[in-house]
Image: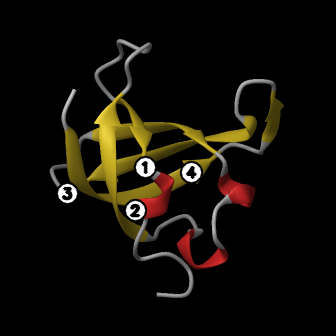
């Protein structure tokens, strides 16, 4: 699956949950510039750098890849180290 650059409007985030596989994770819902819904999972929100964290109703840019194990069209994994447009930028 190709990794693509995306600009996503953050709509909501779930509360962080412990995960045996990912340590801690949240699910984030957003909308891309073409008004398509985007589901980002897993997002280790409290473990990513503070300047890359984001709030609801904020546009962020990041590299995303179609989720390999989730066949829903809107499901993607986010490359957390590529997030730009977070709280401090």
Q: Residues within 10 Å of mark 4 (few under 14, many from 20)?
A: some
Q: Residue 67: image x %, image y %?
A: 38, 25
Q: Which residue in the protein does label 2 denote?
A: 82
How many numbered callouts?
A: 4
Answer left or right for 51 relative to 83. right
Q: Which residue in the protein does label 3 denote?
A: 33
Q: Which secondary structure, mark 1?
A: loop
Q: Which residue in the protein does label 1 denote?
A: 79
Answer left or right for 11 relative to 76. right
Residue at 58% in and 79% down: 51
Residue at 81% in and 36% down: 17
Residue 21 in which image quadrant: top right
C-alpha separation, residue under disc 2 versus residue under disc 1: 6 Å
Q: Quadrant of the N terminus?
A: top left
Q: Which residue in the protein does label 4 denote?
A: 12
Answer left or right for 52 relative to 25. left
Among numbered discs 2 and 4, the one appearing first in the sequence: 4
The mark closer to the camera, 2 or 3, is 2
Q: Which secondary structure, mark 4?
A: strand
Among numbered discs 1 and 3, the one appearing first in the sequence: 3
C-alpha separation, residue under disc 1 versus residue under disc 3: 18 Å
- Asked if the residue at tag 4 contacts the one at tag 2, i.e. Cβ–Cβ closer than 8 Å, the answer is no
Farthest-out residue, bottom: 89
Q: Residue 69: image x %, image y %?
A: 44, 13
C-alpha separation, residue under disc 2 versus residue under disc 4: 20 Å
Q: Which secondary structure, mark 3?
A: loop
Residue at 56% in and 81% down: 87
C-alpha separation, residue under disc 4 versus residue under disc 1: 18 Å
Residue 46 in which image quadrant: bottom right
């Amino acid at each position: 699956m190709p990794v693509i650059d995306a600009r996503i409007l953050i709509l909501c985030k779930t509360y962080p949950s412990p995960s045996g596989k990912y340590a801690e994770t949240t699910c984030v819902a957003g909308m891309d510039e073409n008004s398509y819904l985007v589901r980002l999972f897993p997002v280790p929100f409290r473990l990513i750098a503070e300047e890359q964290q984001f709030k609801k109703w904020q546009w962020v840019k990041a590299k995303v890849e179609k989720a390999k194990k989730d066949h829903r069209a809107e499901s993607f994994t986010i490359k957390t180290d590529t997030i730009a447009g977070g709280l401090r930028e």
